[in-house]
Image (spheres, rainbow, N blue to C red):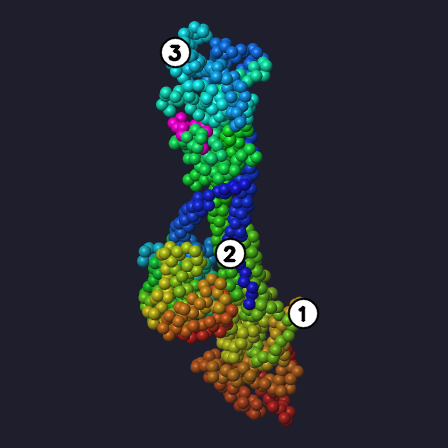
Amino acid sequence: MPIESVSPSRVLRGVVTGCAFGYAGLCLLGHLGYRALLYPAPEADDVAPPAGARLVELRASDGVAVHAMEFANAAAARTVVYFHGNGEVIGDDVWMAQRLVAQGFAVSLVEYRGYGRSRGTTPNEDGLYADASAVLDDLAARGTGADRVVLWGASLGSGVAAEMARRGRGAALVLVTPYTSISDMAALRAPLLPARWLVDDRFDTLAKAASLHVPTVVVHGTDDEVIPFAMGERVAAAIPGSRFERVKGGHHADCFLTDDSLLARVAKVAR
Amino acid sequence: MRPARLTLAQFFFAATALAAVVMGVLLFAFLTASRRSILESSEHLRAAAARRIEERVAASLSQATDVLEAIERDANHGAMSTDDPTLVEARLFSAVQNAPHIADVTFTRGRRLGFDADGTAQLAPEARWQVSVFRASARPNTPILTRVVTTEDHRFVARRRERAVDAPLLAAPFIPEGAADDPTVHLTFSTPASESGYRHLHSSDLHYSELDAALPSMERRVVLSVQKSIDDAAGTFVGVLKVELLHATIDYELSRLKVDESDPADTHRVFLCDAHGWLVSRVSPNDVLELRGDDLRFAPTHAPPMITAALGFPGLAGVNDDHPDANGTVTVAGQPFLVTFHMVAGSQGWVIGIVVPAERYTRDLTLLRDRFLLAFAVITVLVLAVGGLVLGRVGRAFSRISTITTRMRGFDFAPANGTAPFRDVGEVMDGLERAKTAMRALGKYVPVDLVRDLYTANREPTLGGELRDMSILFTDIRGFTTVAEGLAPEVLAPALGRYLEAMIASVHSTGGTIDKLIGDGVMAFWNAPARHPDHAKRACESILTCLEATEKLFASEAWAGLPPFFTRYGLHTDTVLVGHFGAPDRLSYTLMGDGVNLASRLEALGKQYGVATLVSEAVVERVKGDFVFRQVDLVAVKGKTQGVRVYELLGRAGLDGPKLALARTYERALEAYFARDFARARELIAAQLEDGPSATLDARCVHFQESPPPPGWTGVFVATEK
């Protein structure tokens, strides 16, 4: 007995319409909500400065409160201004700061808006640049000008460091596990969405690379599970005269722990 | 190379997608099976309805037969004389009167003589007449008319009379109509009267009633007729009886029929057609009759599309007496319609058709499907949303844990005050915090660098050591026991704590390792576990730093006026064993070797000279350029015969002033002493006897002046006490 099943064209139309609405909704959600994914500030603000460090409170150009943790080093010729990753607060990089101090640098860990003590304002690309500028301005006002500043960015911070370098705010640049751009990262993470068009905070380091003319070191771990190793390679290749440090077996956050001699090599370039 | 593993999020989304696909497939299978079963049972329902309708149609058709058979019986039994037209008229009138759907009953008289060769009846020329009793029109309560055809002068003439409604039977007079045709010539007579048709019932399909021949076809009655030969009581052929049934009766019956009696909004449509797909009943009031082949059929000018489609169903052509049923689906404008056909037994090949939108049966299922799909979509979206949210938070917590462990690997054990969104994640973070607390606590007992090395090496320490060039420092507070006895414990403990804190900080600041605290004393060493090629310099620097730091402490408010401690330092550089010593499960990271004992004895030896620092020659040789020393003596410590030069650390290179002058004077005196010129030595230091070493040397010179040393005396002082 021939029994006609549900008309396929009708079902198809319904499915296509449903998918289209779902996709559009997903795009809208992605556009409105990507910052929550890009800036997953941990609910921690352990900024009690350890011995030898102090907290500095500043105002960014738009009035937002910005904090920095300064590690003094009387013997230091240069100050490392450190821009941390998106899942960190400055307390997470105290150990790194102490190692940099041991390498003969003064260090200033920058706490972006929305993070740790600077919590309360939503971060965005321009806001992060404003925060970085505020710290650099403050250092310059106290006698540490661009010629004595090493811009050091890890992960998300690599984009901030690169932008500050483009603006001529430092004498050396260190990019640890950098991305080519946040747009590329978004495209990588949401392969089915038009992520490049949904993300406003582009942090386009690759586009700025050619205009960076300070001594630069790019560090990337081969086993990076967050930002592909190839991105670090591309960034290094695009920055004229940069040095690329390939950390075999290094993950996203432990390059300097994986290779004990790495810090000394990087410091040599930055010093 | 590790096998590729899914992340939590990838696993979650893959699992959700898989669940969705499985649910979708199951739903599809369920819906298909349900639909099939529903449609199959609907087929049974329609088949039963078709048989019910068949009975009703057959019953309608049998009205004509019933009338015919009743009259036939009367004729057979002699109850109706077939010789008198008036008596026949009365009988026929009562038949018409009592059967409202009968349009016409006609008796045609003829006397058969025999049959022709072709079976046609041979009739006697006389006794040919016809009586017809019929209704004036199809409308109810119309007058009943009679038409009689008889022979007059060998010509057929017709008369008619019309009776008003409810008027007596024979009241109206006959009105002559004039000439008429021979009624026995008509097919409706000749066929039942023929040899082959005799005593058989003859049905004819739809045709216009001849009674209305004068009317336009739209107004003409459509009838079905039955004919049969009639015999008298003797069994002799006397004529043919014809009964005409109004077709409208069937339309009326069909219009009242419902497939589902319980549903007032039944969407089933019932119609009557033939195997050619031509309509036998009207499906709309405006359908007109057309001649299709030999039969009258309705042209479905305004038929609903589903009936038009049903009439075109290919299976209909195959319906016959042997295969009376057909079922199937037709599609109109993309919508499926179910059709059922059933042949009416004993009819003129008439077929009952039932057509219904499949939606009538599948509506509930479709509703169920839509609801289920909606619920499914909502649940999927909810699962994805909640799952995404939870995954986001778990991912963030994992990232936090990763960051904390990275900090720990970076040897940052400072407490972190993060909060965890879930209890189990929180427990992991609490566990990490506890581990960090343990590490912080451990760092108070054992050298931090050692812990760091162990932590970095990621393995447990095992018994064993290595020979390494080390600088070893012992310190002690002069007369601490006496000081301690004079102080309350609650004053002493914090004071000692502050003092040791300053000492330890000074050692750490130069990269030294605290081996252990021995009461008020400190044992420290340089060049392990962290390697420092300039360890001797670092050690000397550390002593100076200790001196400065404690001096500052004693002068500070925190010291609260307590008497300052005088600390002795003994420093020696030597190749000793360094490593983990002790029992396998109770290790200490420490040093072994003669060099350790010498350093300890140097500290004790300081007492002899009243100096704060006593440094071995090995140290001085390495750091000559960086610090200023004075040789204090040549000593063979307990258990040794070889003498070693021992020095006091005066300060950093570039030191000048009275302290240095004093030291140089002392060294000249010491040379004189070694040269047995005790008087010269005493003379040199006579002005500085408040200096410890000078006072000690002076006492020795006095002793040797009284009892000169034996020949071969080298000046080596043999230290007898530890």
Across and down, in percent, residue B706 comes to 61, 88
Residue at 48 percent of width and 71 percent of height: A247
> Between marks 2 and 1, how big is the CA–CA gap?
46 Å
Three-letter residue code for mark 3: Pro
Label 1 neighbourhood size at 10 Å, few (<14), some (14-19), many (20+)? few
Across and down, in percent, residue B717 comes to 61, 85
> Between marks 3 and 2, how big is the CA–CA gap?
104 Å
Label 2 neighbourhood size at 10 Å, few (<14), some (14-19), many (20+)? few
Residue B68 belongs to the span the image colors magenta: no
The one nearer the camera, A90 or B592, is A90
The residue that mark 3 highlights is B176
Q: Is residue A192 left or right of residue B398?
A: left
Question: Secondary structure beneath disc 1?
Answer: loop
Q: In this rendering, which labeled residue sits more in front, label 2 or label 1?
A: 2
Question: Secondary structure beneath disc 2?
Answer: helix
Label 3 neighbourhood size at 10 Å, few (<14), some (14-19), many (20+)? some
Across and down, in percent, residue A226 comes to 47, 62
Query: In this picture, which residue range is highlighted in magenta?
Result: B278-290
Question: Secondary structure beneath disc 3?
Answer: strand
> Which callout, 3 or 2, points at the residue further toward the start of the chain?
2
Disc ID at residue B10: 2
> Which chain letter matches label 1?
B
Three-letter residue code for mark 1: Pro
Three-letter residue code for mark 2: Gln
> Which chain letter matches label 2?
B
Disc ID at residue B584: 1
**CB atoms of marks 2 and 1 within 8 Å:** no
Residue at the bottom extreme of this rendering: B711
The one nearer the camera, B414 or B157, is B157
Residues tagged by mark 3 and mark 2 found on one chain of the structure: yes
